[in-house]
């Protein structure tokens, strides 16, 4: 049994050690800008350049705030205030929000308070058979506030891709991405299929590694140029990306793959991601609160950040998990195509020793529970679905950078899922 109090002390020590050097000061960031390491990597698609762009730039104070998003001293608050600091695109709530039923009699296993503290929990919810049996809010987070989901957003994009496929807007998962977004022709994404993108097997030359400073990694360059400075579109970096492996061969987790997938989805449907999400997911789900997607830039021409930008309330994240548990059906209405959840959650094996031993379509296997699957986001965001017990768990968190708690969380989720009412 894990001693959560000891784990909490260790986590606090890790936070104290990492908080000071983890975030560059202004003089470090001044060493590069869009005119430095990122120039030429992302064509500005129909965006004004030159002096006329200046008034659209975020102010130095806004840029400084954006660069504190992951700061462990404040991320419990920045994760719920992203809409106040970053460009974003609203996603309408349902016209007639639905109520979620509640049931009594469920007791959380072990020392939940110690687990929640040790794993930097902002909120957690458990549903069993479609009813809320446990709900907890911490750190002044409240039920009507939106929390960033980070890469849980990828799973949402996969849901929308399945809908587009069923509607005929995407003809086949084995279509090349260039069929829908021809600008990719001639680059690393030329020949990459929609299936390759869903499985994170594009073969494109990028590492999900965020090294800032004088010699930024490509991932860091994309983040700062598109999201912090709002001077380019995230997905446009895919146009000039290189190739390091044949498509379909090797798993390489890359947010750029999902950014390209999101752009392909928008081109195929002729609708922006925020409208797709509102009309095809939040409306039929009966979502109670407006959500939003963080956006890249420049202002007025940017797009929703498909790979990491969705923000919603705890309960509306739970509605998405319940949708998957119920095979895409809500109140008798089919919202996701028949069999699509099975395709999304058919895991291809990765490292069997890892707490994430498999990956499907933008969806992870977390732990070893049979048939369980998860949407997982940076810094401890989880939608965990356990079909055998008909359990959905949502956990919103504020991990410090570098925290590795998936094994602890997977173990506790399994205890929750297997605990009877």
Image: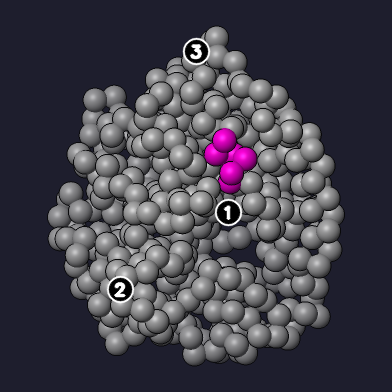
Mark carried by residue 421: 3
Q: Is residue 54 visible?
A: no
Secondary structure of residue under mark 3: loop
Can residue 215 be found in the magenta stretch?
no
Relative height, residue 403 to residue 41 (above, below): above
Q: CA distance from mark 3 to mark 2?
A: 46 Å
Q: Earlier in the sequence, mark 2 or mark 1?
A: 2
User: Marks 1 and 3, Cα distance to the nearest angstrom?
Assistant: 31 Å
Residue stretch in magenta:
406-411
For residue 356, side relative to residue 55 (left or right): left
245 displayed left or right of 17: left
Task: Please tell me which residue is depicted at 33% across the width and 45% down the height of the picture.
Answer: 345
Q: From the viewer's perspective, is residue 329 above or below residue 27?
A: above
Q: Secondary structure at mark 2?
A: loop
Mark 1 sits on what residue?
Answer: 378
Give 231 or 346, whichever is nearer the viewer: 346
Q: Residues within 10 Å of mark 1 (few under 14, many from 20)?
A: some
Q: Separation of disc 2 and disc 1 at Cα?
A: 25 Å
Q: Position of residue 290 (x, y in %)?
A: 49, 41
The location of residue 2, given as percent across then percent down, is 69, 34
Q: Where on the picture, by quarter, is residue 331?
A: top left
The reply to whether callout 2 and callout 1 are in contact (CB within 8 Å) is: no
The disc placed on residue 247 is 2
Q: Residue at x 82, y 42 (%)?
A: 9
In the rendered view, would you say 206 is above or below 281? below
């Amino acid at each position: 049994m894990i001693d959560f109090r000891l784990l909490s002390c260790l986590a606090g020590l890790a936070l104290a050690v990492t908080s000071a050097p983890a975030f560059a000061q202004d003089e470090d960031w001044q060493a590069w800008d869009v005119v430095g390491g990122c120039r030429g990597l992302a064509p500005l698609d129909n965006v004004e350049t030159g002096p006329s762009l200046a008034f659209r730039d975020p102010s130095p104070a806004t840029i400084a705030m954006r660069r504190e998003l992951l700061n462990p001293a404040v991320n419990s608050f920045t994760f719920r205030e992203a809409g106040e600091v970053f460009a974003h695109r609203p996603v309408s709530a349902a016209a007639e929000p639905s109520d979620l039923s509640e049931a009594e009699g469920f007791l959380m296993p072990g020392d939940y308070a110690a687990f929640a503290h040790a794993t930097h929990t902002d909120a957690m919810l458990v549903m069993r058979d479609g009813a809320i049996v446990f709900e907890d809010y911490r750190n002044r987070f409240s039920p009507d506030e939106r929390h960033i989901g980070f890469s849980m957003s990828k799973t949402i994009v996969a849901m929308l891709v399945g809908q587009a496929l069923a509607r005929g807007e995407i003809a086949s998962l084995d279509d090349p991405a260039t069929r829908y977004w021809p600008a990719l022709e001639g680059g690393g994404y030329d020949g990459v299929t929609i299936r390759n993108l869903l499985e994170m097997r594009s073969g494109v030359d990028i590492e999900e590694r965020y090294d800032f400073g004088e010699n930024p990694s490509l991932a860091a360059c994309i983040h700062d140029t598109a999201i912090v400075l709002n001077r380019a579109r995230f997905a446009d970096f895919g146009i000039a990306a290189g190739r390091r492996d044949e498509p379909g061969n090797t798993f390489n987790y890359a947010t750029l793959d999902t950014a390209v997938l999101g752009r392909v989805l928008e081109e195929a449907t002729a609708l922006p991601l925020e409208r797709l999400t509102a009309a095809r997911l939040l409306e039929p789900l009966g979502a109670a609160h407006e959500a939003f997607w963080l956006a890249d830039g420049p202002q007025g021409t940017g797009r929703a950040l498909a790979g990491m930008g969705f923000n919603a309330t705890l309960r509306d994240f739970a509605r998405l998990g319940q949708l998957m548990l119920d095979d895409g059906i809500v109140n008798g209405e089919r919202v996701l195509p028949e069999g699509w959840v099975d395709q999304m959650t058919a895991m291809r094996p990765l490292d069997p020793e890892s707490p994430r031993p498999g990956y499907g379509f933008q969806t992870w296997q977390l732990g070893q529970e049979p048939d369980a699957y998860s949407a997982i986001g940076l810094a401890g965001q989880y939608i965990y679905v356990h079909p055998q017990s008909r359990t959905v768990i949502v956990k919103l968190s504020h991990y410090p950078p570098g925290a590795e708690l998936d094994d602890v969380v997977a173990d506790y989720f399994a205890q929750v899922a297997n605990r009877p009412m």
